[in-house]
Amino acid sequence: MMLVLLGLIVWAAGWVLNVWISRLPRTRATALAVPAVFGVTLILMWECLVRGLGVPSVILPPPSAILVRLGSSVPVLWLDFVQTVLKGALSGYIIGCGAAFVTAIIVDRYDFLRRGLLPVGNFMAALPVIGIAPILVMWFGFDWQSKAAVVVVMVFFPMLVNAVQGLQDTTVMQRDLMRTYAAGYWTTLIKLRLPAAMPFLFNGLKIASTLALIGAIVAEFFGSPTRGMGFRISTSVGQLALDLVWAEIVVAALAGSAFYGGIALLERAVTFWHPSQRK
């Protein structure tokens, strides 16, 4: 019971500290401190409650056990990271987003494609990944190529919708001004419409970054060589090695957060002029 009480005290202390930090003048340091304090508080409370209540490790291992497993399984985790993130998710992300961008330019050029393709895109985006993953695994084999294909399907239409919407985000006055300069379609596209579409494009890239990792991991549940995050999670659950499952989850969360954060930093550098980036 002492550990349970300690966990509650940690939670209360973290709450009070975050309330105090939130009242300080908003700076980069205080903006980072609030989630950092919240995260540390949650981990400490998790450790205290799991150990204090005697929760079996096959149900929920403590963070310390997960950390030990992370340190002892670095070669396995790295092999799974390369297979799932670098081969499956990243390759599918690049192919899917690139194809969606090219398709968006074609759709923007021909109005009948916008009317016909976008409703189909909304339908395809609603398809569950657990429905299409087994089919694509059978089509493309059990290696990373089938996982990349799943990622392409998942990221293509969200990216397409955002790109098409962004290319339309110019006013009539702006387009008339370009015509007064005798600018053709491609000149207007490059100098006016693509810069105006950048916030939408980055929004699509950020959405696709989370979908890519989810798609690659879930696709590995339906067939994979003896490596990969999805493969390791499914087999470790069957072996009741929940500490390894949580270690894979931590690696996936860190990889996804780093990927999303990198895109957000690039967005800030490219779209510094947009009101959403002003402080």
Image (cartoon, rainbow, N blue to C red):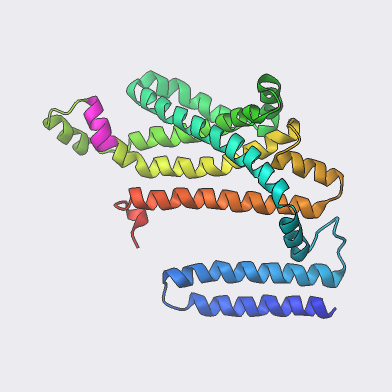
Q: Along the horizontal axis of the image, is 120 left or right of 135?
A: left
> Which residue occupies 53% across, 43% down?
209
Where residue 194 appears, as percent x and y from the top left, is 31, 36
- Please determine whether, in this image, residue 38 is positioned above or below residue 89: below
Q: Nearer the viewer, residue 277 or 170?
A: 277
> Which residue occupies 43% across, 37% down?
162
Placement of the N terminus among the 4 image quadrants = bottom right
Q: Main secondary structure of the magenta part?
A: helix
Where residue 224 appears, as percent x and y from the top left, is 73, 32
> Which residue occupies 76% across, 42% down?
232
Q: How many marks?
A: 0
Q: Nearer the viewer, residue 178 or 95?
A: 95
Name which quarter of the figure residue 101 lies in.
top left
Is residue 186 rendered magenta in the image?
Answer: yes
> Which residue occupies 85% across, 59% down?
57
Where residue 259 appears, as percent x and y from the top left, is 52, 48
Q: Along the horizontal axis of the image, is 87 left or right of 63?
A: left
Q: Which residues are magenta?
A: 185-193
Placement of the C terminus among the 4 image quadrants = bottom left
Q: Is residue 137 visible?
A: yes
Is residue 177 rendered magenta in the image?
Answer: no
Name which quarter of the figure residue 223 lies in.
top right
View extreme (front): residue: 75
- Please determine whether, in this image, residue 155 is positioned above or below residue 251: above
Where residue 60 appears, as percent x and y from the top left, is 81, 59
- Please determine whether, in this image, residue 6 is positioned above or below residue 218: below
Q: Along the horizontal axis of the image, is 73 left or right of 146?
A: right
Q: Is residue 125 visible?
A: no
- Please determine whether, in this image, residue 214 is positioned above or below residue 250: above
